Image (spheres, helix red, strand yellow):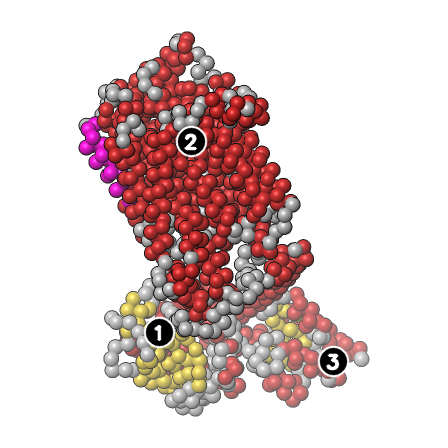
Amino acid sequence: MAKVLVVDDEPNIVLSLEFLMQQAGFDVTTALDGESAMALVTENPPDLVLLDISLPGISGFEVLEQLRSQESFKRLPIVMLTAHGREVEREKGLALGADDYITKPFSTRQLVEKVQALLNESSQGLQED
Amino acid sequence: MRTEWVSLAVGFSYLGILFLIAAWGDKRSIQGRSIINSPLVYALSIAVYCTAWTFYGSVGRAAETGLSFLLVYLGPTLAMLLGWFMIRKMIRISRAQKITSIADFISARYGKSTRLGVLVTLIAVIGVMPYIALQLKAITISHALLTGYPLEPTQALATKAFLFDKSFWVAIVLAVFIILFGTRHLDASERHEGMVAAIAFESIVKLLAFLAAGIFVVFWLYQGPMDLFEQAASRTDLVGTLGLDAVPGGAVGWVGTLILSTLAFITLPRQFQVLVIENVDERHVKRAGWIFPLYLFAINIMVIPIALAGLLMGDGSPDDYVLTLPLAAGLDALPLFVFIGGLSAATGMVIVETIALSTMVSNHLVMPVLLRWKWLHLDPALNLSGWLLGIRRVAILLILLLGYLYHALIGESYTLVTTGLVSFAAASQFAPALLLGLYWRGGNAKGTAAGLVGGFIVWGYTLLLPGFALSGWLDSSLINQGPWGIAWLKPYALFGLEGWDIYAHALFWSLLVNIGLLVGVSLFSRQSNLEQTQAALFTEALRPDVMQTPLWLGQTTKGELYQLANRYLGKVATLKIFTQLGSTESPSAADDTPASPTLIAHTEKALTGALGSASARVLINSVVRGEALDIEAVLSILDTTSQALEYNKRLEQKSTELAQIGEELRGANVRLRELDKLKDEFVAMVSHELRTPLTSIRAFAEILRDSPEVSPEQKSHFLDVIVKESERLSRLIEEILDLARLESGRMRLDLKPVNLSELAKDSADAITQLYDDRQVALKLLLPAEEAWVKADPDRLQQVVINLLDNASKFTSPEDARVVMTISSKTNRWLLAVEDNGTGIVTEERDKVFEKFHQIQQHKDASGSRPKGSGLGLPISRGIITHHQGLLYAEAGQVLKGARFVIELPTIQP
């Protein structure tokens, strides 16, 4: 069962994402800030991360940067979640190595489809290796 | 109605009213609320130009020589419309040099020459004599007509001994009135606001009286102007009377009279007085430039109709038509009003003329002589300001008696207008010295004196002397054959210049001699140093830096200056000079510290205001030792290099101004950009805050829609989230609207007396549930008395609840406590909310009031406690500021956490 890590500082958003991912058949862990997210990733590496940008303490961008700087997480699929709709932020996220960028509020179906697609891609990539 | 007594009573009442107006004007002037500070009053005061000559004489002139009467008014109109810049320059100079009269002006221009002052004064007194005689004659005749009609008024004139001559008594009454009116106190300044107010009033009276007479003639005696003109046209003997060719001397006469009146309008002592000396604000000159001609038009419009009606009546002297027409119609009140109008025209002229002349006589004839008498210098205790008043009073009496003398001797030989023109010609002799002096630096005192003497002699020979001959005091062969039979010396046809109008003739020769001598002698003689300086100061008067240079570099003591000023100006005015210059200790005669050049210059200016420039110069000279004036220093300011310097200075000033403006623009641009950035950030923050609850709402709504397998417990939990987040969204929108209202100033407050303690209790009650949920203990410490403030209770409660809500989020996790206290400070009530959390670091205390600023919450508390929007505190501060109160954060006093304080002004319930 694929493992998905959900990081967001809004408890209700975390709750909804947790429900959606479980319903789609994934194993879900959650974090409410950047530091605990980093700890969870190293402790129990997930197959995909849903990462909010504005987090208390270290921000989502910083988490992304730190993960991409480690060899083991270079190809970990990361989807950025943000309530900032501005183009610059989207570009910044993609430049830092995010696989996709989803603006809040999102369509639950599209989100689930996107997560499934990314997980398929990465598992195929792994198989090809 | 027309008895002696009634006319006298009305006449004296009129003078009484004038007196009251003058007193009122003086009082307002002292209070600093001038009533004459308007172009209209200025224009009306200039209308003192219209004397009894205008009032009675214009009709006489029109009846005899047609439209020529208008020339005398075209001249001044031209002077005001085209010559205003010259008048402005004279005003500027007079203000700077404290000029008191035209004699003072000319004397000051040519090196503060005492001799020129004497000369101008003498010419003015003698030249104006006929003019004053004219007024006396007009008052006497009009009064005789009023009381004696239809008796011939000429019988009232000088055939009797002077004690029985009414003119003599008119002169005496006027002298007494003017002494009371114009010399009640010695003005330290040279201006008489009360007099100007009275003169302006007189101008209104004479205009109304004349118009009344005209309207009576046109619409009462005749059926309107057409009727009058038709009847006149039907009389063959009147044809051509009003034609242009009736003007004596033809075209030369026209031009001569026009030039004469243009010059005299400025140079007559009384005109110079009202135009230049009494001017309050030089901007009035330009505005009066069209008001005054309008006045002249109004007062002349009825001249022709009255003249025609008089000719049709065919009875009496044309000079009397204004009065005889209503008298002949058997009216009572109108003739009385016309008489008052004529009286106002005459008194207005006599008042201003004699006050101007008496100042000239005292300052330029008498004082210089007195100052030369050693014994006056010997007694420094003697107060001379009383003397000055005395001299002026005697001068007033003498001037009027001289006027009477002229009237008694030759008053009969000329009509009103011709008498006036004799004076005009005399006054015109000042024009070359005055006007050339404004623009030509080369003229000097010698040349001016020569020009004045020459011009005056020619005037006397061509106009005054023939007058005596015409009235039989001299042999009439003088006019017809010339003196000793020499034909080319005939006064009316000098050097064979025959066929000219006598005024044009006199004006031509006298101005020719005058200008010729002025220019000629000036070119061939040297200017003294002082003359050079004054010439430069006058011609360059419109340059801003010129007039304020202190000119004295000699040495004297403060004590000596004090003594001097005290003697001539009195104690009050002297103290004013010394205190104006910032001297703190009271000046005394014993003070032997050296006086500064500025103090000497100020003292001289003040003395000039009372005594005229020449006398003041003599006095200052008597106490100042050494070089009176550093010529090099003064001239260096005025030569071309200084002009370049001035130009440079202005350029520099302009470029610094430009640089400043550029800097300001840059600053404004930066501020605008900052505001723009702030606005962008705000919009981004708002959208972020709105999207967050919306995300939860949409996610759970879609889950409920798409997932049939959700358990009932989950379903109710999810719905609960949707409701809570919707509430959060509404709250947020409400807050954003509040913020917008606060920032645009559209927040409306329903202010009423509020007991702060009650409000604190209500707020605590409202938030009990929340505190219970969060397990926070709330304690209230309220004062015994009622704490009244003025506030919008709902808004204030919103703020208190916001503070309580915030406090509950930042309490210590174990034993969470919040305390709300109310206390008083000078005139203020303080409501403080304090938690037992970790507090806010000093540098964060102001930032928490910024929009969307999020305080870092306890890490372990995150999740369990809801985040705020970051708008609560900015809104709260905005609301309290709208209440004229303060909201700030400080270190906790009781629980050592964060403490938020609201301060509001105390009120009585």
Label 1 sits on residue: B904
- In the rendered view, would you say B287 is above or below B143? below
* Pointer 3 local density, CA inside 10 Å: few below 14, some 14–19, many at least 20: few
Q: In the picture, which quadrant includes the N terminus of chain B?
A: top left
| Disc 1 from disc 3: Cα separation | 59 Å
> Is B165 in the magenta?
no
Q: Which residue is mark 2?
A: B420
Q: Nearer the viewer, mark 3 or mark 2?
A: 2
The location of residue B694, given as percent across then percent down, is 52, 67
**Res B213 seen here:** yes
Nearer to us in this view, B854 or B675? B675
**C-alpha span from label 2 to label 1:** 80 Å
Q: What is the span of residues highlighted in magenta in the rendered image?
A: B2-19
Most distant residue in the right direction: A129
Instruction: Where is residue B135? Give x, y as percent.
Output: 35, 33
Type of amino acid at the residue the image marks with label 2: Gly
Decide whether residue B12 is among the magenta residues: yes
